[in-house]
Image (cartoon, rainbow, N blue to C red):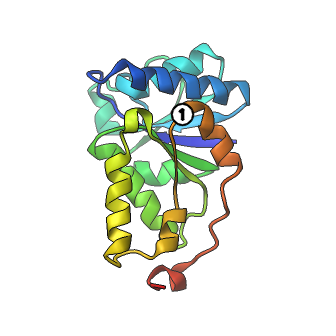
Amino acid sequence: MQVCVYCASSGQIHSDYFEATAKMVKDFAENGVSVVFGGGSSGLMGQLADSMLEAGGKIRGIMPQFMNEVEWGHRGVSDFVYTQTMHERKSKFLEGTDALVALPGGTGTYEELFEAITLKKLGQFSKPIIILNTRSYYEPFRQLMNHAIREKFMAEDHQEIWQIVNEPEEVLEAIKNAQIWTKDLKDAGKMR
């Protein structure tokens, strides 16, 4: 199984985020799950790579060339794909991916997550999207999505596009038990 992980590059965050990432990766490595990530060396990206390498797991970084030129790439990761643009990078994240996991992050993580949700809503992506809610980080996201549903900008069943879990040990189980998304473009705009 290959899982794409979206996560932060900030190193200024609470230690709980680093610990949750390390626990999730340990579970992945023990179960033979390979990881694709943004390729960075700092923040949760760095923790993700360090933990995966330490556990002997398989990890691939995908990074635009301009980020590589300023040496943002994790030096311990030997499997790298370099792209010309951020858009191409996001497309490469989804190639061969069996699931997406969003760890806490900033605008880049949010942007990647929302694009994946949109693609799934439109029937262009069907894999599980799991959101790890460490320190209740994604509670505002949950509230925002519920508000969009209440205000009829989204159908109620669109909340089945993603699943939120609170503990890193729940991520792999959530992937394995995720409902298969069968909606397609003709269903995307229907409000029930």
| Rendered position, 187 above or below 74 | below
Query: What residue sits 61% from the left and 31% below the top?
Result: 169
Left or right of 157 in this view: 71? left
Query: What residue sits 54% from the left and 23% below the top?
Result: 78
| Rendered position, 170 above or below 121 | above
Q: Amino acid at mark 1?
A: Glu
**Quadrant of the drawing holding the N terminus:** top right
| Rendered position, 123 above or below 65 | below
Q: Residue furthest top?
A: 54
Of residue 133 and residue 41, the one placed in the foreground of this image is 133
Query: What residue sits 61% from the left and 57% below the top?
Result: 127
Q: Quadrant of residue 68?
A: top left
Left or right of 41 in this view: 126? right
| Rendered position, 98 above or below 70 | below
Query: What residue sits 54% from the left and 33% below the top?
Result: 167
Q: Residue furthest right?
A: 31
Residue 54 picture location, percent across and down: 59, 13
Residue 55 picture location, percent across and down: 64, 16
Total residue callouts? 1
| Residue highlighted by disc 1 | 167
Residue 82 picture location, percent across and down: 43, 39
Residue at disc 1, secondary structure: loop
Of residue 30 and residue 149, the one placed in the foreground of this image is 149
Q: Is residue 86 visible?
A: no
Left or right of 51 in this view: 147? left
Residue 20 picture location, percent across and down: 49, 26
